Image (tube, helix red, strand yellow):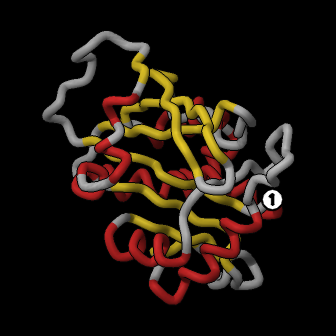
Amino acid sequence: MSEAARIRRASQADAEAILKVKQALALPPDAREAPGGGFLLGSSLEGYRALIDAADVWVLNGTDGAIAGFAVLLPEPVLRASELWTRRQAIRWEVPAGWMPPEHRVCYFDQLAILPAARMRAAELALTALRGAVRTGHQHLFATTVAHPVQNTASLALLRALGARRVGSVDEEYEGVGRIVSDLYYAPIDGADERLQDTRAGRRAVR
């Protein structure tokens, strides 16, 4: 891999480029289905600056050196202090109460954004973020994908490769988009490398 084509931790100097990737993957107001590369909701320049300071944010540089994708993972302390955590009572769970030990560390995969030209490296970028979470003692991963009014299917194959399962859904409200319904997925992150090796993209990421 060339020096330009690499995955690294984001810095404040990357915030504007991250926002441009997000804007390139915005959902058109009249869309009836997701674009081929998926779509991204929420977050502003100020929001991304705050995430870079507080959360685990990784960027993917393309072969031209420009940022072609990014991943945002909220470690447990950041997750518990977030608005997401305050809305957890609104989740419609589809699993028995107490199914996950509350004392085990939980993280949330907030965003995974890849421009279409670099989509083959999505698993590599996701795995880099997950390995960081494992190193800091996290054991459980949650992620959401939009299911209504437009389904975002771009990350479903990766979630399946990680062994994730749908455990519930939640209603959310986004400025400029309105009400959406998101599916909530869960996966144990120990052994993510081994599970990803069952996919072609995952094998490349693990190597």
Amino acid tagged 1? Pro
Q: Secondary structure at mark 1?
A: helix
> Horizontal placement of 173 versus 94: left or right?
right
At horizontal 45% and vertical 83% (from top left) the residue drawn is 11
Q: Is residue 177 visible from the viewing direction of this image?
A: yes
Q: Is residue 1 visible from the viewing direction of this image?
A: no
* Vertical side of 56 occupied by 124: above or below: above
Q: Nearer the viewer, residue 105 or 51?
A: 51
The answer to which image quadrant residue 120 occupies is: bottom right
> Horizontal placement of 20 versus 78: left or right?
right
At horizontal 68% and vertical 49% (from top left) the residue drawn is 177
Quick one: which residue is furthest to the bottom in this view? 13
The quadrant of the picture occupied by the N terminus is: bottom right
- Residue 101, image x, y percentages: 19, 25
* Vertical side of 1 occupied by 134: above or below: above
At horizontal 41% and vertical 38% (from top left) the residue drawn is 142
Graded by Cα atoms within 10 Å as few (under 14), some (14 to 19) or many (20 or more), the crowding at tag 1 reads some
- Residue 129, image x, y percentages: 45, 57
Q: Nearer the viewer, residue 134 or 29?
A: 29
* Vertical side of 41 occupied by 69: above or below: below
The answer to which image quadrant residue 145 occupies is: top right
Residue where numbered disc 1 is placed: 116
Q: Nearer the viewer, residue 207 or 120?
A: 120
